[in-house]
Amino acid sequence: MNTVTVIGSINLDRTIRVTQMPKPGETMHTKEIFSAGGGKGANQAVAARRSGAKTAFIGAVGADEAGKTMRQLMGQEAIDLAGVATVAEATGQAYIIVDDHGENSIMIHAGANNAFTPADVREHAATIAASDFVIAQLESNLDSTIAAFELAHTAGVKTILNPAPALKQVPEALLRVSDLIVPNETETAILTGIHIDSEASMHEAAAALHALGIAAVIITVGSKGAYYDVAGRSGIIPAFKVKAVDTTAAGDTFIGAMSSVLAPDFSNLEAAITYANRASSLTVQRFGAQPSIPYQAEIEAANHEED
């Protein structure tokens, strides 16, 4: 069982289901409105925990009802929340529109996610040092994320960076302490300037990311699967074909589930990606972020059904 520490965002999601995405100035009726646990960081932590990893979280919530709700939801998952501070800012929230094709549009208010500091992170250096992997995204304070990755690097702990939401310029200080980077096609293009439209372009982009000092690269390509490039091994692991109803948290499920089974030397990366693809294929068949994330038993059962 891997030990995983996630640093990043905790959001309370407000999801609105519609038949089709509204046009500018258009008013329409909704099909459903509901709230659920979310935030890329929290989603990844839940996915890792539900796949059996011992999981801790470093981040922040506000002293509000949303913060209490998120503490309760994550606590029910048996995630170690000792690293989650309570701050004056409001808990992060996301507003998500999902249409009948399963596509989504997401607006985020960061709030407390940008309020915890490198000093807060350093208080939990022992938790980081005891991990097999430290995972981060770009939905929270960048200086705090860099501090966590630097602590991990010093301790010999592998780091996984999900560069989302995409930034035109990810700090070099963060990239040089990232061991595995997991962008999607759009994020890859922003990071490297290379348009992703073929396996050859993925290989070129991976080479550019390796040149930044990143040992392992995974480029997720939605329903096509995931391209990987590590230690001279590369290729595409196909996605499982399913009917998607909501793609929210699909990428987060992929990263969290993968971290639970990945060897720290990346020797089983291909198998870990296959496992993560299966987990994501279950997520997209359900609505909501954290409510849609599968448990290890469900993933294994789906694999047996396919055999």
Image (spheres, rainbow, N blue to C red):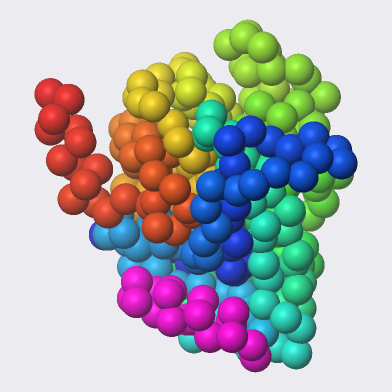
- Screen quadrant of the N terminus: bottom left
Judge whether residue 145 can be spotted in this image: no
Residue 74 is covered by the magenta coloring: yes
The residue drawn where x is 42% and y is 75% is 73
- Where's the C terminus, which quadrant? top left
Q: Residue 96 location in percent, x, y?
A: 64, 51
| Magenta highlight on residue 255 | no
**Horizontal and vertical percent for residue 126?**
50, 80
Residue at 87% across / 41% down in the picture? 25
- Numbered range of the magenta stretch: 63-81
Of the pair 90 and 200, the residue shown nearer to us: 90
Q: Position of residue 59 (x, y in %)?
A: 61, 75
User: Is residue 15 visible from the viewing direction of this image?
Assistant: yes
Q: Compared with residue 290, is residue 192 higher up or lower down, i.e. above or below? A: above
Which residue appears at 67% of the width and 84% of the height? Answer: 62
- Residue 274 appears in which quarter of the rendering? top left
Which residue is at a point 43% across and 81% down the rendered structure image?
A: 72
Residue 276 drawn above or below residue 70: above
Circle count: 0
* Residue 211 lies in quadrant: top right
Give the x, y percent position of residue 232: 50, 21
Q: Is residue 284 above or below residue 202?
A: below
Could you tell me what secondary structure mostly forms the magenta stretch?
helix
Query: Nearest the camera: 82 or 16?
Result: 16
Residue 64 relative to residue 6: left or right? right
